[in-house]
Image: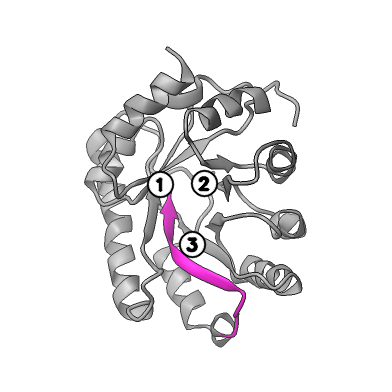
Amino acid sequence: MSIASDLQQIRLAIPSHVTLVAISKTHPVEVVMEAYNAGQRIFGENKVQEMVSKFEAMPKNIEWHLVGHLQSNKVKYIAPFVSLIHSVDSLKLLNVINKEAEKIDRVIDCLFQIHIAEEETKFGLSAEELNELLSNPEFKQLKNIRIVGLMGMATFTDNAEHIRREFKSLKDLFKRIKESDFSQNDYFKDLSMGMSSDYQIAIEEGSTMVRVGSSIFGNRNYGAST
């Protein structure tokens, strides 16, 4: 099947209120352009260098989402154009994003990445760390970032009920944080959870944004140049 037909199938499978982020990491521009030509306008990358090169090469009406772990020293390269950073996991990183956004008079939308999986290799804040960050006076002074929601990745397992429990825990945290810290902020509305293998479960548990790569583009090309 073609990328266009795969995209169409996924769009038919997700509700209209759920945003589809096509994860284009490791795929060359010509392949990603197939998705663009099929109407996709939101793409996600996990490496700054690759995202910058695709931004430069592709049409400028694309929303670029940074979904991978972001190093503080690379924020400056994406600050001028990134639409959403999914992977904020520290006050230090938020401070850098805020500083770089302030330089260019932008407000950059961000998601807090929450650690919900059993794998220790995944990044993210615990619920306790999130509460500490939100109550820190330093956080409240940041004017050039906007927290629009939460992101999380479930454990890589075939156990659907295990995955469901992790997504449910993230949705519960989202609701608590919305009520306690963002009740006056309509923009705090995004819950980014679910990938190719589990996005249907994620949607059932309240996801508003799914990150789908291999189901659109096929297996990743890790030998691709960036």
Instruction: Please provide the residue range marked out in magenta.
Output: 141-152
Q: Indicate whether 43 appears above or below 84.
A: above
Q: Residue 112 carries which label?
A: 3
Q: Are marks 1 and 2 in contact (CB under 8 Å)?
A: yes
Q: Decide which of 144, 72 is in the foreground and name it.
A: 144
Q: Decide which of 39, 3 is in the foreground and name it.
A: 39
165 inside magenta stretch: no
Q: Mark 1 points at which residue?
A: 117
Amino acid type shown at disc 3: Phe
142 inside magenta stretch: yes
Label 1, residues with CA under 10 Å away: few <14, some 14-19, many ≥20? some
The numbered mark, 1 or 2, whose residue comes first in the sequence reads: 1
Q: Indicate whether 3 appears above or below 14.
A: above
Name the residue: 43% across, 75% down: 131
Q: Mark 1 and mark 2: span between their CA atoms?
A: 7 Å
Quarter of image, res 186: bottom left
Pick the quarter of the image with the N terminus.
top left
Label 2, secondary structure: give it: loop
Residue 159 visible? no
Amino acid type shown at disc 2: Lys
Pick the quarter of the image with the C terminus.
top right
Q: Name the residue under label 2.
A: 122
Residue 20 placed where, x, y %? 41, 41
